[in-house]
Image (cartoon, rainbow, N blue to C red):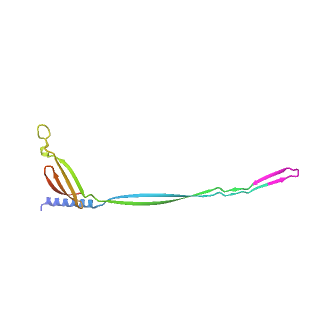
Amino acid sequence: MELKYKVLIGAAVVAGAFAWGRFSAPVEIKEVEKIKIVQVEKKVEASKEKKDVVTVVVTKPDGSSTTTTTDKSTTDTASTTDTATAVDSEKTKTTKYKKPDWNVSVFGAVDVRHIGGGAGGLNTGPIIFGGEIQRRIFGPFHISGLLLSNGTVGVGLGFTF
């Protein structure tokens, strides 16, 4: 076997291995949702009052009176206590998608051997229309069928990379 065929076979094997490795990796989307909940608890203690009012009335022998009022009341003010509790949660969702198995192509073409001829400008010959359908058969490898408007029919083998 000649050296050029060995090089072509080696290049085909390397390209096929690269395509296989790239194709065999799953398509994956990872969504991470982080939630932080902060709960604040407020505690209020009511105020307490203690009333202690003393009124003393002193009557003098001349008939006059003196009134003395002593207020010993105490008032406690309300106190507030805040406590905060934080809760962290993380939710992860992974979605895997299947790779497509089918590919359909349509195209138009001209015969480039006829470009540039003729007195009136470009003479390209008839436009050829065609279509191709591909189906994945094994890993990154595809088989395809080709049909052109000029009656040409063909098959192909390809790989995705």
In the image, is 63 to the left or to the right of 22? Answer: right
**Residue 155 in view in this figure:** yes
In the image, is 13 to the left or to the right of 55? Answer: left
Q: Position of residue 100 (x, y in %)?
A: 26, 57
State the predominant SS element of the stretch in magenta.
strand
* Image quadrant containing the N terminus: bottom left
- Residue, x 43% and y 60% (percent of image)? 90
In the image, is 56 to the left or to the right of 35? Answer: right
Q: Quadrant of residue 77?
A: bottom right
Q: Position of residue 125 (x, y in %)?
A: 13, 44
Q: Quadrant of residue 159?
A: bottom left
Magenta segment includes 146: no
Q: Position of residue 98 (x, y in %)?
A: 29, 59
Q: Which residues are magenta?
A: 56-70
Q: Position of residue 103 (x, y in %)?
A: 23, 55
Magenta segment includes 61: yes
In the image, is 122 to the left or to the right of 139? Answer: left
- Residue, x 22% and y 52% (percent of image)? 105
**Residue 161 in view in this figure:** no
Q: Nearer the viewer, residue 130 or 78?
A: 130
* Image quadrant containing the C terminus: bottom left
Q: Nearer the viewer, residue 81 or 143?
A: 143
Extreme residue toward the left, this view: 118
Number of numbered discs:
0
- Residue, x 80% and y 51% (percent of image)? 67
